[in-house]
Amino acid sequence: MNKWSFPLVLLVAPALVVAGGAPPNSDSGPTEVAEGRQIYEQYCAACHGWQGEGAADWTKPDEKGEMPPPPHDETGHTWRHSDAMLFRMIAEGWRHPFNKTDRLTMPAFKDILTDQEIQLVIEYLKTLWTEDQRRYQRSESQDVN
């Protein structure tokens, strides 16, 4: 090991942790985040995007008068909801209040995913937000409980 190896490890290790999906200052470990990402990719990414980017023109109603799937990354508003609200939306589904139709535009997953799997997805979503957004969302989640 040469004299540059140790400083290099100090520089690279934090980047590997973040690249691995674990958010800074999160209670979730890399395993939980990886499981959440896998569930997200299987059940959510087709609508909300592989990187959480949402549908194109997600702020404008589509031809049916329904709001398209929003992004879950830092450009969207998912981070403004408490854990309890996110859990309820995933479990029970969601109909945007401005939709012109009565159907659930976000299907319910309570019969497909376990409570633990839903929580893992929520933990993965948190990795898509900025630290300020995670701090805000943590506060929202504490205020609800």
Image (spheres, rainbow, N blue to C red):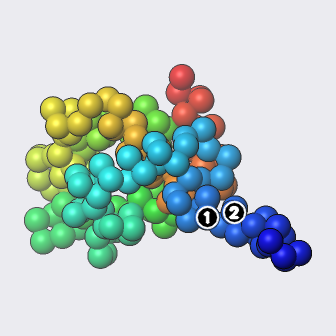
Instruction: Please state the horizontal and vertical placement of residue 130, each as a whole percent of the image.
Output: 61, 60
Name the amino acid, label 2.
Answer: Ala
Residue positioned 29% across, 58% down in the render: 41
Residue with the most extreme front position: 1
Q: Give the class, few, some or many, for how many residues have Cα within 10 Å of label 1's Cα (few <14, many ≥20).
A: few
Instruction: Please state the horizontal and vertical placement of residue 12, each as a whole percent of the image.
Output: 70, 69
Residue positioned 69% across, 62% down in the render: 14
Q: Residue 51 versus residue 12: which sits nearer the camera?
A: 12
Q: How many marks?
A: 2
Q: Give the class, few, some or many, for how many residues have Cα within 10 Å of label 2's Cα (few <14, many ≥20).
A: few
On residue 103, the disc is none
On residue 13, the disc is 2
Q: Tell me the SS state at disc 1.
A: helix
Q: Quadrant of the C terminus?
A: top right
**Side of 134 relative to 87 (left or right):** right
Q: Residue 65 versus residue 114: which sits nearer the camera?
A: 114
Residue 87 appears in the rendering: no
Q: Tell me the SS state at disc 2.
A: helix
Q: Quadrant of the N terminus?
A: bottom right
Q: Residue 57 versus residue 28: which sits nearer the camera?
A: 28
Instruction: Please state the horizontal and vertical placement of residue 22, each as a whole percent of the image.
Output: 56, 53
Q: Disc 2 to disc 1, how far (Cα)?
A: 5 Å
Instruction: Please state the horizontal and vertical placement of residue 94, each as a whole percent of the image.
Output: 24, 44
On residue 16, the disc is 1
Residue positioned 55% across, 43% down in the render: 29
Name the amino acid, label 1.
Answer: Leu
Q: Picture quarter containing residue 51?
A: bottom left
